[in-house]
Each structure stands twice: as structure tokens, then as C-alpha cells.
Image: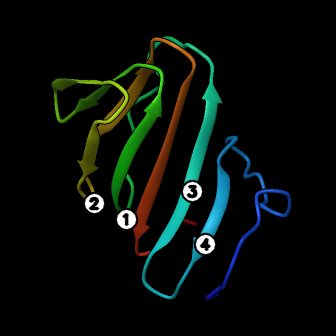
């Protein structure tokens, strides 16, 4: 599963619009690029921990019942198993790392 360099022209796009970046055996990176504004998506949980960094746009992360405003320059963490959703307020771009790698 480990990859060296991933060029933006070669990066695969996943089923939910995420762009797969470099990945190793224990951590993987992905980018959400220009996600359009949306209403709350259904809440979900994931078996992986996620840390992210907001590049542009604004969103609200609803994490275990708490609403967290996200703006450019902010970083965030979603623990494994935590109930969460994102409300995109402005075209949103963020880079995330997941451990173990998100499927």
C-alpha cells in the first residue's frame, strides 16, 4: 500500500470526491478540493482517526454534538469512532491524514 510521490495529475479521485494523496502502511493523506456548500450530511463514524488542515473556504464540523467552525488555517481532529458530520458553508478545500488509512 505504501506509495512514494503522488503527482496531482496522477492522483485518483474516490467515490466521495476525495483526492487520494500519499499513503503508507499506517497513515494516508487525502484532499477534499472545492467541496460545494451543502446541508448537513448524515452523521457517520469511521474506524480511523482523522486530522485535517483547512486550505480555503468555511465549514462547520459537528463532532459528538459540538459544532466547531472551520476556516482557512484551522486544523482539526476527529477521533476514531466519533459521531460527526460536516456542513460546508463556502467552497471548501482541506487536506486530511487518516490512521489507519481510510478505505
Judge the density around disc 1: few (<14), some (14-19), many (≥20) Cα neighbours within 10 Å: some
Which of the two discs, 3 and 1, labels the residue nearer the N terminus?
3
Quadrant that contains the N terminus: bottom right
Dots 3, 2 in contact, CB < 8 A:
no
What residue appears at the point 57 percent right and 56 percent down from the top-left corner?
30
Dots 2, 4 in contact, CB < 8 A:
no
What residue appears at the point 58 percent right and 66 percent down from the top-left corner?
103
Question: Going by the image, does 74 lie left or right of 7?
Answer: left
Which of the two discs, 4 and 3, labels the residue nearer the N terminus?
4
Return the x and y of residue 75 as percentages of the image width and height.
Answer: 28, 43
Which of the two discs, 2 and 4, labels the residue nearer the N terminus?
4
Which of the two discs, 4 and 1, labels the residue nearer the N terminus?
4
Judge the density around disc 2: few (<14), some (14-19), many (≥20) Cα neighbours within 10 Å: some
Question: Going by the image, does 63 lie left or right of 24?
Answer: left
Residue lying furthest right in this view?
Answer: 9
- Residue placed under numbered mark 2 in the picture: 80
- Residue placed under numbered mark 4 in the picture: 22
For the residue labelled by badge 1, is the local secondary structure a helix, a strand or a loop?
Answer: loop
Quadrant position of residue 89:
top left
Amino acid at each position: 500500500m505504501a506509495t512514494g510521490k503522488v503527482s496531482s495529475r496522477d492522483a485518483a479521485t474516490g467515490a466521495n470526491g476525495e483526492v487520494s494523496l500519499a499513503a503508507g502502511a499506517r497513515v494516508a493523506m487525502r484532499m477534499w478540493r472545492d467541496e460545494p456548500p451543502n446541508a448537513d450530511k448524515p452523521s457517520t463514524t469511521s474506524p480511523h482517526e482523522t486530522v485535517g488542515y483547512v486550505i480555503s473556504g468555511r465549514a462547520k464540523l459537528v463532532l459528538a454534538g459540538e459544532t466547531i467552525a472551520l476556516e482557512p488555517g484551522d486544523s482539526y481532529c476527529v477521533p476514531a469512532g466519533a459521531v460527526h458530520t460536516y456542513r460546508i458553508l463556502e467552497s471548501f478545500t482541506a487536506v486530511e491524514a487518516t490512521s489507519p488509512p481510510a478505505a
